[in-house]
Image (tube, rainbow, N blue to C red):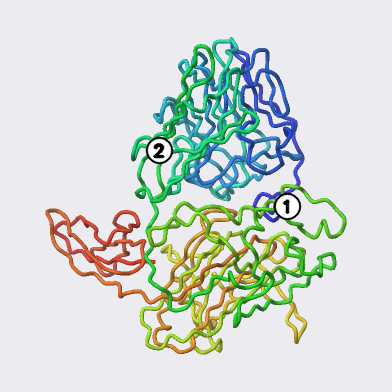
Amino acid sequence: MKRSLFTTFRTVALIATGIFLSRGAQADTVLDFDIRPAGQNNNVVILQTFGDAASFSSDGVTVTDFGTPNINLTWQATGGRWDYYLDSVWSAGQLDSSAVGDIHELVFTPNHPSAAAVIKSLNFHPYYLSNERYAYDVSVLTNGVTAFGPTNYNFIAESAKVPVSVNYTGSIGQTLTLRLARVSSSPGEGEIEGAGGNIATDDITFAQLPETEFAIGPQVLTVSPANNQSSVAPDYLYVATVTNGATALNPSTIQLRHSSGGLVSHSFVSDSGLSTIRYAATGLLPAGSVNRYTLTFSDNGLPPKSYTNEVQYTVAAYVNIQLPSPLAFESFDSTPEGGLPVGWTATNLDTLRDPTSEPNITVTNLDSAAYTNWTVVEASRFADPFDVYSTFYNGGTPDPTWTIDYQRVLTVNPSNVVNGVFLRNLSTSRLAFGNSGYRNDALGQVLYLSSPDFNLSGKANVHVAFHSLWEQNQDSMAAVEYSIDSGATWLPVVYLLDGPDVFTNLDGTIDALTTFTNVHPTGFQGVATYIEPISGQILGGYYGAFIGVDSNLWSTLAPNIQRRVDDNSLESKRVEIFRLPRADNQPTVRLRFTTVGTDSWYWGVDDVGLYSLADFQITSITRSGANAVVNWINGTPPYQVQVKTNLTDPWSNVGAPTSSTSANVPIDSSTKFIRVFHN
């Protein structure tokens, strides 16, 4: 699968370098990632048990003398994930999708109240791309409070590792959180902000005090939500796994409390010494609220010992989208897998399929004829492996991490709430699926999905809403357009593009004409091309080649262009809502979904609906002290309030986007122009 890590890699002469770290007085545990442990696949999430209770060396872990038998680790991240990556350049923990603003954390938890953790050092390890610059704030937190740092490390990607010295010793029984927060590096001339997948850490070194191995009882292995996790889904869902130690968990002593209501009723299942404690309930927690689960239990020792595990977390700042009954709706659930609903059509452009691709309709092979066009697929398939690049079909064995890579299609976005219900799964049965990734098509993939014509006569304020399971790649585009003349001409809805491919004017506004006309490199690292059937010429290579809006209108499309994040499996899993201004009162309204890429991930579309939403309008602006209180009705959240003092000035935001229909705008003696807009 084409990822930024792979597409930007260039062969380099590896330089034999060494980072020699002082060992100090304590015996150390070093996470060197040199060998993958059993059950750990390459380029996938690090096993939560990796590095736990290390009393001797094992695959990927080097222990000097005593080690850390009473220290457990938790790998967690906000906006990315920790991946185990081992190849000719890296033996490291990849900070996958580490963009500016994202946080990766490693939590060191004593598994006995008499032990203390010591965080000593680590190395940043970029992927040897000499024009990429990175910056991280490194800190240690205790009980959510910064106890060390933050210390800023700003470096260019080159052959040498970047050593980070911490040397922080926690108190007895205290949990330490090592935080690596990506911040802007302010690249210099000829430099760029480093790609989110091209950075890793290795040689993570820590120790235990005192050098005494304490017998441990039941231990919490995993817990969701994790402690200090942000952007957590707003529903009540808690899962903890506990393993027996020298003594076993006594299930009759388990109690689980939530900060919103005290003691809650949990379920308990035990199998081969591993216990699972689960709680689920209806309802939603407030957006942005801080909550806490407290799990307590005792073991069966004589005398019994008590244990407490507490997690504090913050709910995502979701917006509760309100949708009425649809004017038209398609769920794809009644359509047989491999087909399309009645009246829906799919077309593609000839991108010269490789002869090694499978010609059969095989929905378990991403490189088969099944995925040469849009098709209806069971959502549950994305929990299982796929054949990729037709490797199985041709008698080979693909990298096992590639075969499960499309499990990211089902990534849960914690901000999807509609009519007071959290949508943990954007697709629960079947969906329309357009694929670009893991295919051998030489020129790329260009797929169009068109709806039938809908009669919206007498309908006003028409919007389209749909569940979008999109993942951006650096040269891919998702486009939604609509037609009011049965497809003779097309009108813009939205165009999703990788941020660097969106050109801007000197004032920072989007230059839509250049964005759509700029010719990119072709092939694996460029925009798709195709064979024109009459002339036989290879055309394309620029995004405008694949949109339906007339080229003389491309310069007007800036409001329809949205930047999306490369290789981020979460941020574009959304309920999308867009106004169709020229669809009001039209008897033939048609939708078209277009996906364009070159081995560039996928687009799943589900629950497509047309809606008549009430007019959006400001109802009042009144003064209250030093503020103007602005009230409005209708529209689709999130809303953004903006002000300016002169008509010629640019608009500036007042606060963050909100789901409220009221806002306070600070005022002074100068004139204020106020506006509110919505999605």
Badge 1 density bin: few <14, some 14–19, many ≥20, Cα 10 Å: many
Q: Is residue 225 above or below residue 246?
A: below
State the quadrant of the N terminus: bottom right
Q: Nearer the viewer, residue 387 or 273?
A: 273
Q: Amino acid at mark 1?
A: Thr
User: Could you give the CA–CA distance between mark 1 and mark 2, rounded to whole angstroms?
Assistant: 39 Å
Q: Position of residue 411 (x, y in %)?
A: 56, 53
Q: Nearer the viewer, residue 501 or 211?
A: 211
Per the image, the residue denoted by label 2 is 264
Q: Which comes before the other along the chain, label 1 or label 2?
A: 2
Q: Disc 1 on helix, strand or loop?
A: helix
Q: Is residue 543 above or below residue 317?
A: below
Q: Quadrant of residue 62?
A: top right
**In this image, 484 relative to 41: left or right?**
left
Q: Amino acid at mark 2?
A: Val
Can see residue 187?
A: no
The label shown at residue 403 is: 1
Q: Position of residue 654 (x, y in %)?
A: 29, 56
Q: Position of residue 405 (x, y in %)?
A: 67, 52
**In this image, 243 relative to 621: left or right?**
right
Q: Nearer the viewer, residue 613 or 531?
A: 613
**Mark 1, mark 2: which one is toward the viewer?**
2
Badge 2 density bin: few <14, some 14–19, many ≥20, Cα 10 Å: some
Q: Measuring 71% from the left and 41% from the top, which residue is drawn there? A: 41
